[in-house]
Amino acid sequence: MGPGQTVAVFGAYGHTGRFVVAELRERGFVPVLSGRDAGKLRALAASHPGLEVRPASVDDPESLDRALAGSAAVINCAGPFATTAAPVIEAALRASIPYVDVAAEIEANADTFTHFADRARAAGAVIVPAMAFYGGLGDLLTTAAMGDWTAADEAHIAYGLSGWHPTAGTRAAGAVSRQRRGDRRVRYRNGRLEYHRDDLPTVPWSFPDPMGRRDVVGEFTMADVVTVPSHLSIPDVRTHMTVEAARDVSAPDTPAPAEADERGRSAQTFVVDVVVRSGGRERRAVARGRDIYAVTAPLAVEAVDRVLTGRTKTTGVASAGEIFDAPDFLGALSAHLSVELRV
């Protein structure tokens, strides 16, 4: 099993969905284009001759069943995932196929673990949430950095983005998350998620080259606070964001990403710097690359490929670092990421 199989992509015409469709085709899979807007699906299909279009809505379970029929797996790229994740997971369970999504929404990912863990494990199903730049990549890097450690005192995941031009989907997902939190902030301390209204600190962070020393917004919390603690014994998981990127994503007038190469990627670059500490010892993992949305595609497609070819370590709802061999997975992304482990 593997390449040559059909993979349904829900939200195929979105910014990230288009990268996922292109990556699936490049890897030899046959994408099935799905989503709510039939017109946008047909427009996307015009640039991918031969691909099947199957409109579907999360409010219509039968349409989702038709969209997934005959597919080997489904990748959900349609946010806000607070709305789409559960219905598409239910459809994947009915179809007995693996589910992967690219959700960066903290609450939506937590809901997936809470509501589907027992059912998925009992069914021997595979559900991988947050298989994306936020959540999946940080989890893989943290798992790889842990190495032979079975526990650590704390983990810090610092995002060094040259800038952050958010997509419409990012803005919509952020609005839903803020509404669900009542405009509170969230962090992971003492082994649990905490909601708070504290001001976020600005602190210096020494990124590896080429970024160097930058100010970051401390506890600018991302999906890693769900994925990492789901399987690693680390009671304090914190994520940080460069001040410039945090300012960009918060500003209402920051434009969407602009294409800067033949693959449709933006000019944005990133350094993800992960530090885990235990008893005075420290380990580090660093990833460098380009375009946080574009790099999500190889993360999600590599996950599907590994699930379909049996290169997994567990079933049920599992984050990337738990279900896959993290160093091997990261090595497989060498065309898209450079990764350095300092263990």
Image: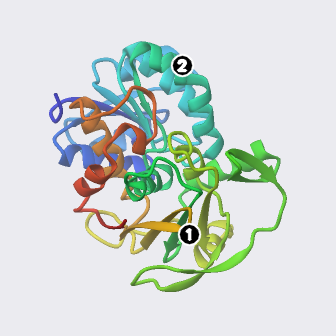
Crowding at dot 2, Cα within 10 Å, few <14 / some 14-19 / many 20+, comes out as few
Q: Quadrant of the N terminus?
A: top left
- Looking at this view, is 32 or 159 the one in front? 159
Crowding at dot 1, Cα within 10 Å, few <14 / some 14-19 / many 20+, comes out as some
Q: Residue at x 20, y 41 (%)?
A: 49
Residue ranking furthest to the front = 279
- Looking at this view, is 117 or 132 the one in front? 117
Expressed as whole percent of the image width and height from the top left, the position of residue 47 reads: 26, 48
- Looking at this view, is 299 or 173 the one in front? 299
Mark number, residue 255: 1
Expressed as whole percent of the image width and height from the top left, the position of residue 253 reads: 65, 71
Expressed as whole percent of the image width and height from the top left, the position of residue 254 reads: 60, 71
Q: Is residue 195 visible?
A: yes
Q: Nearer the viewer, mark 2 or mark 1?
A: 2
Q: Secondary structure at mark 2?
A: helix
Sequence-first tag of 2 and 1: 2
In the figure, 315 relative to 16: above or below? above
In the figure, 1 relative to 322: above or below? above
Mark number, residue 118: 2
Amino acid at dot 2: Asp
Q: Is residue 257 visible?
A: no
Q: Secondary structure at mark 1?
A: loop
- Looking at this view, is 222 or 73 the one in front? 222
Q: Is residue 112 left or right of residue 321?
A: right
Q: Residue at x 35, y 73 (%)?
A: 260
Amino acid at dot 1: Pro
How many marks can you see? 2
Q: Residue at x 63, y 70 (%)?
A: 246
Among the 4 quarters of the image, the one containing residue 128: top left
